[in-house]
Image (cartoon, rainbow, N blue to C red):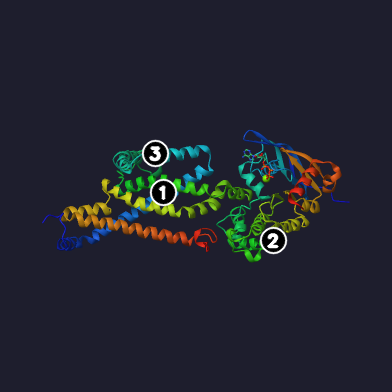
Amino acid sequence: MNAPAQPVLEVRNLSKSLGGKLILDDVSLTLNKGELKVLIGPSGGGKSTLLQCVHYLHRPDRGDVFLEGRSAAEMGRRNICAFRQEIGMIFQDFNLFDHLDAENNVAIALRKVKGLAKAAALARARAELDRVGLADKADLFPAQLSGGQKQRVSIARALAMDPKVMLLDEPTSALDPDLIGEVLNVVADLARGGMTMLMATHQIGFARRLTREIIFMENGRIIETGRPDDLLAPASESRAAAFCAKLTELLGH
Amino acid sequence: MSSASFSLSGLLSSFSEAWPTIGYLLGGAGTTCILILAAMLIGLVMGTVMASGQVYGPPWAGRLVDLYVWFFRGVPILVLMFLFHFGLAGLLETAAADLARSDLAARLFGARLNLRPRVSPFVSAVAVLGLCSAAYQSQIFRGAMQSIPVGQFRAALALGMSRRQAVAAVILPQALRLSIPAWSNEYSILLKDSAIAYVVGVSEIMSRFKAVASATHRYLLLYVLAGLLYYLLTAIGVRLLDRLRRRVRTPGLGESDATGY
Ligand SMILES: Nc1ncnc2c1ncn2[C@@H]1O[C@H](COP(=O)(O)OP(=O)(O)OP(=O)(O)O)[C@@H](O)[C@H]1O
Ligand SMILES: [Mg+2]
């Protein structure tokens, strides 16, 4: 009934040690076109490290990442920049460029990396800001934006590069509760629009609604994967269910 | 009446005696200004490159810069000035003359050239003050670069920028803004250090005031005026840099936005 699954991103047997400690232990996963997969797991489990390795911000010790079949391990320095450009990355703490206003935060990589002229880059930037509901904030600087607005600018900045995949590393963890919704809405819009995404989050309710696969990570390994309803059912006795029950107890929702 | 004793009429007659030399004296200020502008520019360019290498470059680049800074911090400018002008400059002149007479020059210019290039005192002074200021400026920029959250660098890489692009487009513009107050301090120090250029024969403020003082024997007046002139140049430079700092300030960042207690 569905078109045959097209893998966009394949992570094969990634391992990574940092400071002499094994942080990622033989992690593999596949993202098909239009899929959103959600990474959950206890703090220190290796979610951030996994996303950074996928992006080659950390070079994995073993294993490889394939973007539409092209191996990242076989790319040289120059090609890695092109590879990264095709994978959008959203950070927990936004990492906007503090000296640039919102539209220039989005435009700068269009100019430096894609070589667009200034006017074209700014036009594209404003279109992307509009898409995340910030058309009226284009000339505000990061220090003048709320956390939720900053994260939406960072999403616009990533989208402007026309990424094939988006990696989101707890995009709402640094936000006040009343600002989480505006960012999750943008992510949900992207998911409905068919963006391929891998997202680490503690927003279990959000994950249940939007994803068909949850990946539970602990101690650098993928312990369990499955549909949220199966994996998180209280009767499933899965580690993921126990973890989520604890989260719910702590956060009270 | 000896020239050291002080009286109003003595001072006034000093003035009238020194007045015809005013153009000559102020010309020295022009030389000093060009001297330190050139030195600061050399220091700025070398300093940013060295700081970038130290913060975002390979480990060997950091060690190389450490060595450089250690050397220029450890040796007095006066020693460096003599070392360069009376030692190294001579070697450079000989090497350049040899090169001009060599086969290489014959191949490049079609003839062996009989040149006797000279390193002028001014060039020596610019080189020494510039190299010295580079050491200090590199540490100003290094501190500023290290204070920019590394996440911004990572975000720039994540967008597909090379390390060099990320440093140039994201880190340096912020680090240079943050450096302006320390840079203004470096300017005021370098301005006064530039008086040392007098010892190798640069015709700057100190050298010209000394010449007029010796000729007229009005030592007190002329050295007071020399001091005032340095003070004036410091004040103007610091004022201008503060204006620059305010002009390039990022909205929402920095102290002047705080409106409460
Ligand atoms: N540069 C480093 N050197 C040494 N250890 C590191 C380094 N970076 C991360 N680690 C360790 O790697 C482990 C995994 O960290 P990581 O940030 O990937 O976890 P996480 O699942 O994202 O956690 P969180 O939910 O808190 O974000 C942690 O134990 C952390 O201390
Ligand atoms: Mg993390």
Ligand 1 within 8 Å of disc 1? The answer is: no
Mark whose residue sits in front, 2 or 1: 2
Q: Is ligand 1 closer than 8 angstroms to the Cβ of mark 3? A: no
Residue where numbered disc 2 is placed: A132
Q: Position of residue B58 (x, y in %)?
A: 53, 39
- Name the N-terminal-most of marks 1 and 3: 1
Residue drawn where x is 66% and y is 46% of the image = A83
Picture disc at residue A56 = none
Residue type pointed to by label 1: Gly
x and y percentages locating residue A41 in the rendered image: 74, 43
Dot in front, 1 or 3: 3
> Dot 1 surroundings within 10 Å: few (below 14), some, or many (20 or more)?
many
Q: How far across and how far down the image is residue B116, in percent?
A: 29, 43
**Relative vertical location of residue A61 with respect to residue B141 in this rendering, above or below:** above
Report the residue at 26% width, 46% height from top: B199
Most foreground residue, B83 or A197: A197
Q: Is residue A84 above or below residue B245?
A: above
Q: State the residue in front, A71 or B255.
A: B255
Residue A52 visible (yes or no):
yes
| Among the 4 quarters of the image, the one containing residue A125 | bottom right
Do pointers 1 and 3 mark residues of a single chain? yes
Q: Of the numbered discs in the image, which one, if any, rests on residue B43?
A: 1
